[in-house]
Image (spheres, grey):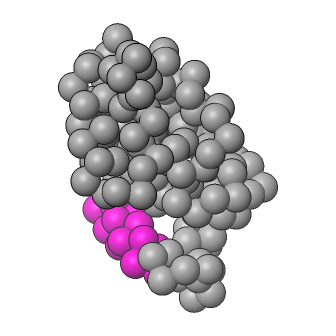
């Protein structure tokens, strides 16, 4: 691996089973700044779901600077890999308001699990844009979750949405 560029070496380490090595790679990639965004976005097409998930985490660490990745990250919420969906939702929240149009696109889809995570993310960014249909999806997941994390995420999002509606 010594002949690899630092980007390539850190990208390879994202898939490491050694947690410390993977987290160090996240930090190293984040510290390279926005000049690596095009390469990270390109790598979102790799076949290894774990590496794709970790790339999404890197983009989330970059926050608003990773805004140009919002569309691609939102599309990943349509994948069938739970960790990738959750990481994508969190990353879009961390990217901020430029994610809203992409989240609205996902909320308009027929994929209830993707809608669930889009609604969770949107509850942080602009809960006033959550439709009654999306609120119902959150309630249904809270009552019949596919994972324990969904219960907590649903409760959190429902609280934000209801609180926002009470203020209006």
Magenta stretch containing residue 159, yes or no?
Answer: yes
- Residue at 54 percent of width and 37 percent of height: 73
- The quadrant of the image that shows the N terminus is top left
Q: Which picture quadrant has residue 62?
A: top left
Magenta stretch containing residue 84, yes or no?
Answer: no
Nearer to me, 74 or 82: 82
Q: Which picture quadrant has residue 14?
A: top left
Using the image, determine if residue 38 lies above or below residue 103: above
Q: Which residues are magenta?
A: 151-167
Residue 44: x percent and y percent? 58, 33
Q: Main secondary structure of the magenta part?
A: helix
**How many marks are shown on the rendered structure?**
0
- Residue at 36 percent of width and 23 percent of height: 2
Residue 101: x percent and y percent? 54, 33
Q: Residue 27 vs residue 165: left or right? A: left
- Can residue 69 be seen in the rendering of this structure? yes
- Residue at 55 percent of width and 80 percent of height: 147
- Residue at 43 percent of width and 32 percent of height: 11
């Amino acid at each position: 691996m010594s002949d690899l560029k630092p980007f390539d070496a850190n990208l390879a380490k994202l898939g490491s089973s050694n947690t410390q090595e993977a987290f160090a790679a996240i930090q190293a990639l984040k510290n390279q700044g926005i000049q690596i965004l095009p390469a990270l976005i390109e790598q979102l097409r790799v076949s290894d779901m774990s590496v794709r998930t970790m790339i999404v985490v890197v983009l989330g660490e970059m926050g608003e600077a990773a805004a140009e990745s919002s569309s691609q990250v939102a599309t990943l919420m349509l994948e069938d890999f739970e960790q990738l969906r959750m990481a994508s939702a969190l990353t879009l929240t961390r990217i901020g308001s430029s994610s809203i149009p992409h989240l609205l696109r996902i909320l308009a889809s027929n994929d209830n699990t993707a809608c669930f995570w889009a609604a969770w993310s949107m509850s942080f960014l602009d809960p006033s844009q959550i439709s009654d249909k999306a609120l119902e999806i959150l309630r249904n997941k809270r009552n019949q979750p596919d994972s324990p994390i969904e219960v907590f995420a649903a409760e959190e999002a429902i609280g934000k949405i209801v609180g926002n509606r009470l203020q209006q």
